[in-house]
Image: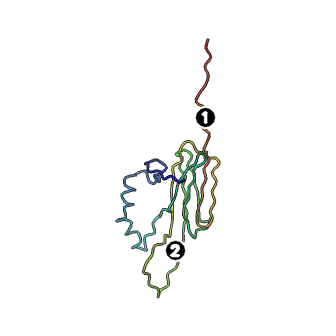
Amino acid sequence: MVRHSNKNTQLSKPQRSGFGWLDTFFDDPWFRAFDRFDDRLEQVWKPTTDVSETDKELKVLCNLPGITKENVKIDLDDENRLLTVSGHVDKEKKEENETYHCVERSYGDFSRTIYLPPNTDMNNIKANLENGVLRVTIPKTIPEKKTRSINVE
């Protein structure tokens, strides 16, 4: 059974600049409609991403169609527990006699940052890019035992 979390957890919120309300303000569909109008402005785009977890691991799936592993970079900020997937997609050359009726594909730099909770093993992260999907697997750590014995005198 697949469960969808409807909670507002740290995992459900992609990390951006630190100005959360401002980031989400410009994610409004009204603002996003203007993203494609000006070809002169190449913007950093965010690949669609799923974050899920099991008892043993955290999984991050990013859609990166047509992108090779040589154009993908994964950085890990140990101090802030942030995993960043970034890279670049070159814009295809347009033919001079070609009229575009719809332009929806993204190009230019892309970046997506995910917060990793404290119970993840940041030393054993694995990543694989296959069929346009980047799969990042982060194992969970086994919680330390919190119970201890006290000798009676």
- Nearer to us in this view, 43 or 83: 83
- Report the amino acid beneath label 1: Glu
Q: Is residue 59 left or right of residue 26?
A: right
Where is 34 relative to 15, above or below? below
Question: In percent of the image, x 37 and y 55: which residue is there?
Answer: 22
* Residue at x 63%, y 51% (from the top left corner): 125
- Residue 12 appears at what percent x and percent y? 47, 51
Label 2 – label 1 distance at C-alpha = 49 Å
Residue lying at the far front of the rendered structure: 1
Q: Residues within 10 Å of mark 1 (few under 14, many from 20)?
A: few
Residue picked out by circle 1: 144
Q: Is residue 23 left or right of residue 74?
A: left
SS assignment at label 1: loop
Judge by depth and name the residue closer to the eye, 33 or 139.
Answer: 139
34 relative to 50 in the view: left or right: left
In percent of width and height, residue 118 lies at 55, 42
Closer-to-camera residue (115/12):
12
SS class, disc 2: loop
Residue closest to the far left = 30
User: Is 89 rendered above or below residue 100?
Assistant: above
Q: Identify the residue position indicated by label 2 in the image.
A: 91
Depth check, front residue: 5 or 141: 5
